[in-house]
Image: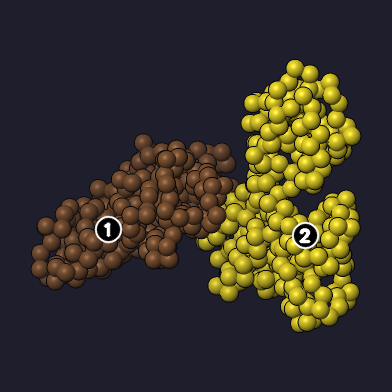
Chain colours: A yellow, B brown
């Protein structure tokens, strides 16, 4: 069976990069879980002895410590660097950008608005690069009682937020302030996977969507593919059924955002031996 | 008859200021018509010998030349200053602001988008403070084929544009570029007159709306007032009718954006002698 992968699928760029960094640093530890996928964390521990620290107190001299994709607050990074350990920064570049924007905008005298969840590790990290003039909001309601110290506002968004909701926040601010400096820090990864699945499902004879059967992300990919071609949702290679490929020449593959590449590869290997 | 003026009416701040400047400079000339109101231009010529130049060629040595509220292109101002004349700048401060924003943003390497009419004198003036990386657009369609030299965009609006339309332009840009620096340069004058008329018409026994009977701006004020109280639209004191004030104690007054104060004052003087 001939196989074609979607041009974008599975883990986003930042997660793939963090996993490669972890694999390159055997016997290291990550500060907090590297990604939200237990089987992948288990694999990194079993195959590369990459361990998991949940607090700075667990860090020991001469450790190699990996900062995860979400990043960590500025002072935690500083404390870590003072501990006589090797720090490997796997913060996603798309998260480093808003961190640096908040730092620069604060230095330039802007009040900063972060659109996101104040309890999310990414947002906590981004916020830490500013001062008292940084606020985190989830809706325009959160802005109603805010008194800004000046009329120059800079705005960034948590990378995984919806653009439509970001524009609501931004428009509210533009109508009320002289200058609003809007940084588009939202990452397109989820939408890229969906767009690529849509394109590929029109080219192939059958489509496999790999991911958790309860994952809303994976189910959305499945529903997109199903509109164009016979499609099947599977969690791993054990779910494969030979009957799906009768009379088919080209099989397309996509995967949900929490599906590790090795699960996808196991499926591809099995597909290759189907005539 | 007791009279109360709306808290905002008639000419906007910038036009009132320009007229005061013209009155303070007898025997001067304005570069282009100072305002869009012929009877006011006639009055300035008759009472203060303020003349009207339509091109730089008309300017003579030792003239006093007044720059009108809309401003003029940078190079015209430079040429004027080299002519050995006294230049009085009556450019509205709300127009000077976008001029300076375009200058600074261009120096800082931003591509600049001006939302407005490229043929309007204000926009021509504002645009002249930038370089080749400044474009003027009236809708998102005008942006579709634009190739920006970098991903840092600054946006300003012609002062008299509608905010809703400005947000459309701004949102289009935010979704497509890394940084969009939005300057809210729209002037609230028109809306301030409407809001003030709405408030005053609820307080008084009768409302006079002074302005051209064909002026859409004046008609809009009239329709707002009429919802709350008996209202009359008049062009000058000759339109006044005594019957309007029978049994009334307090008369409210507002005026369209092209109504000179002296027309309003003539009406107030007549009202004061009505018992």
- Helix, strand or loop under label 2: helix
The x, y position of residue B161, in whole percent, is: 44, 47
Q: CA distance from mark 2 to mark 1?
A: 61 Å
Are there few (<14), some (14-19), or many (20+) residues within 10 Å of tag 1?
some
Q: Is residue A70 left or right of residue A236?
A: left
Task: Please give left or right for residue B243 compared with residue A99 in the image.
Answer: left
The image quadrant where one finds the C terminus of chain A is top right
Residue B117 place in picture, x, y as percent: 36, 45
In the picture, which quadrant includes the N terminus of chain A?
Answer: top right
Question: Residue A23 got which mark?
Answer: 2
* Same subunit: marks 2 and 1: no
Q: Along the horizontal axis of the image, is B43 left or right of A126?
A: left
- Residue B93 in sight from this viewpoint: no
Q: B49 above or below B158?
A: below
Residue that sits furthest to the top in the current view: A247
Taking the spot 58% from the left edge, 68% from the top edge, the residue there is A105
Q: Are marks 2 and 1 in contact (CB under 8 Å)?
A: no
Q: Is residue A58 left or right of residue B226?
A: right
Q: Residue at x 70, y 29 (%)?
A: A2
Taking depth in this image into account, of B80 and A155 the one nearest to the observer is A155
**Residue A170 picture location, percent across and down:** 61, 53
Circle 1 SS class: loop
**In the image, what residue occupies the spot 73% across and 69% down?**
A88
Q: Chain of mark 2?
A: A
Q: Nearer the viewer, mark 2 or mark 1?
A: 2
Circle number at residue B73 = 1
């Amino acid at each position: 069976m001939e196989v074609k992968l979607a041009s974008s699928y599975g883990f986003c760029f930042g997660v793939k990069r963090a996993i490669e960094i972890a694999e390159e640093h055997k016997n290291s530890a990550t500060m907090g879980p590297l990604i939200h996928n237990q089987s992948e964390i288990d694999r990194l521990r079993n195959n590369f002895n990459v361990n998991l620290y949940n607090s700075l107190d667990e860090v020991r001299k001469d450790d190699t410590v990996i900062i995860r994709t979400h990043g960590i607050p500025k002072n935690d990074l500083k404390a870590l660097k003072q501990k006589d350990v090797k720090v490997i920064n796997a913060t996603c570049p798309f998260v480093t950008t808003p961190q640096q924007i908040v730092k620069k905008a604060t230095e330039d005298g802007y009040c900063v608005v972060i659109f996101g969840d104040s309890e999310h590790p990414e947002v906590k990290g981004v916020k830490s690069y500013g001062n008292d003039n940084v606020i985190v909001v989830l809706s325009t309601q959160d802005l109603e009682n805010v008194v800004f110290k000046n009329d120059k506002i800079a705005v960034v968004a948590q990378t995984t937020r919806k653009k439509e909701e970001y524009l609501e926040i931004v428009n509210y601010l533009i109508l009320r302030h002289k200058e609003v400096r809007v940084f588009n820090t939202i990452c397109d990864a989820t939408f890229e996977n969906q767009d690529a699945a849509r394109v590929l499902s029109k080219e192939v004879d059958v489509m496999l969507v790999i991911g958790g059967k309860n994952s809303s992300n994976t189910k959305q990919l499945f529903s997109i593919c199903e509109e164009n071609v016979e499609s099947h949702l599977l969690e791993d290679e054990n779910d494969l059924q030979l009957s799906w490929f009768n009379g088919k020449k080209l099989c397309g593959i996509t995967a949900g955002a929490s599906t590790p590449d090795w699960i996808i590869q196991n499926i591809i290997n099995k597909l290759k031996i189907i005539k």
